[in-house]
Amino acid sequence: MDKEESLKMEDLVVRLFEINAIKFGNYKTKIGLDTPIYFDLRVIVSCPRLLRTLALIMMNKIKISKFNLLCGVPYTALPIASIMSEKSEIPMVMRRKEAKAYGTKKLIEGIYTAGENCLIIEDCVTSGSSILETVKDLRECQINCSEAVVLLDREQGGEAFLKENGIVMHSLLTMSQLVQILFEKDLITAKTKSEVESYIALNKIKPETLAPKEDRLKMSFEKRIPYAINNGAKKLLEIMIEKETNLCVAADLTDATDILNLAEEVGPFICCLKTHIDIVKDFHPNFIKNLRSIAQSHNFMLMEDRKFADIGKTVQLQFTEGVFGINSWASLVTAHSLFGESLLDALDQVSSSDTGVFLLAEASSSGCLFDDQYKQKTIKLASKYENLIAGIVCQSPLFKEHPGFLQLTPGVQLNSSGDNLGQQYNSPENVIISKGGDIAVVGRGITTSANARKEAKKYKDLLWNAYLQRVK
């Protein structure tokens, strides 16, 4: 191995300083901020061994094998991405800053397929805007982007801004770590170190000064797929698009045969069937086998509305053990956020990669004790577990700036305003357009009708037309 390829992180920083890739003085960043430290990695193209070392270190920072494509943010990161592509044998695509006025006029060059996962590579992040510009063009080509690896995080808000827009950033170094290494190696003075640290503390970028966030209510389901980090959410969106339906039927019936008959009747018109498996009087494993077969035949997902709410170990047992064996058949489940991170950690440990959890933030029952503080904490918790969370159960558009989550809204019925037990109903149009629902849950409006198939078709058409109206 070349000497440069075995460098430690401290040695890498020293080498970058020696080739004048790290500069101190008065400079401006891309977004116009004055800065006492400037990172200019363009000079590294003249140091091929160091360039190769950096590429290898960045490859080791992340599990690169899970990606189908690599893309360097133009133009400084392109040489790094090229070496990472050659070493990993993962194809690379290239984004132009401007489309050519002739030929194909494409912004994204290379060979790719819609739905492939792409790792973004960048040298230095201040606001994250450069990464987001690249991601936007890739997503418009239906290339999924949810992670980026960078050499230096300037600690000025870029990581948080990228996360809000569906991108997890992995950095080799922060600016604080960089100046600490240089100080310990006697390459900068204590005064210079202090100036940079003060600059970091006083120059955090406010999100509102950056590019506007995506509004999921105005985005088509197709455009939202790349933002969905949870595989269950992605699959659900794909089904919704293919079948042109955002209807979920609540099969709150107590007889297994009745549920199977209902699933067969409404199957062509739904994206999801929601169950309360513990109310089925004649439960048998064969019932689940038959229900899964119907779901596969009609291409809809199964959601068990278990509403997990207990200590982690108990939740794990409720999910994996007992007569119902929920984890063996339900791709989607519901949970309360009352028990916080421990509950989600527990589910994450025993879930497959395709399991999606819907967290409850609001309910359709009158007198519910969920307050505004609880709702916001639920959204914050969901954002921390994006790989596990498919969406939020709520009655209002609480998370417009999180297009990767789906809003599941229960309490939909055409001809009723409620029942004598506190249930409140809304029309399909109101739920989708005014309340922000992506998927509407209809129960008794279909299950108690004389013709469930006919009613499901009616609700399906009304809900889908409401969605089309909303995004237009």
Image (spheres, rainbow, N blue to C red):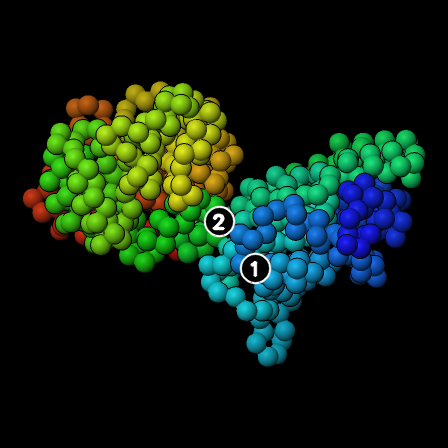
Q: How many marks?
A: 2
Identify which residue, 231 or 395, lies in the foreground: 231
Picture residue at 70% right of the left edge, 43% below the top: 172
Name the residue at 64% across, 61% down.
85
Rendered-image quadrant of the C terminus:
bottom left
What residue is disc 1 on? Answer: 69
The kind of secondary structure element at disc 2 is helix
Q: Which residue is depicted at the point 21% across and 49% down? A: 293
Instruction: List x then y, in percent, for residue 214.
Output: 51, 48
- Horizontal relation, residue 151 to residue 367: left or right: right
Farthest residue toward the front?
1
- Residue 261 percent across, percent down from the top left: 12, 45
Three-letter amino acid code of the residue under disc 1: Leu
Image position of 345 (left or right of 77): left
Viewer-side residue, 143 vs 429: 143
Residue 254 is situated, as x and y percent measured from the top left of the image, at 14, 32
- Which residue corresponds to the image point at 53% horizontal and 58% vertical from the top-left? 68
> Which kind of residue does numbered mark 2 sit on?
Tyr
Mark closest to the chain's N terminus, 2 or 1? 1
Q: Nearer the viewer, residue 62 or 137?
A: 62
Q: Residue 399, relative to residue 343: is it above or below?
A: below
Badge number at residue 331: none
Distance between mark 2 and mark 1 Cα atoms: 17 Å
Is disc 2 surrounded by few (<14), some (14 to 19) or many (20+) residues within 10 Å? many
Residue 319 coordinates in the image, percent (x, y): 33, 31
As helix, strand or loop, the secondary structure at mark 1 comes to strand
Which residue is label 2 attached to?
227
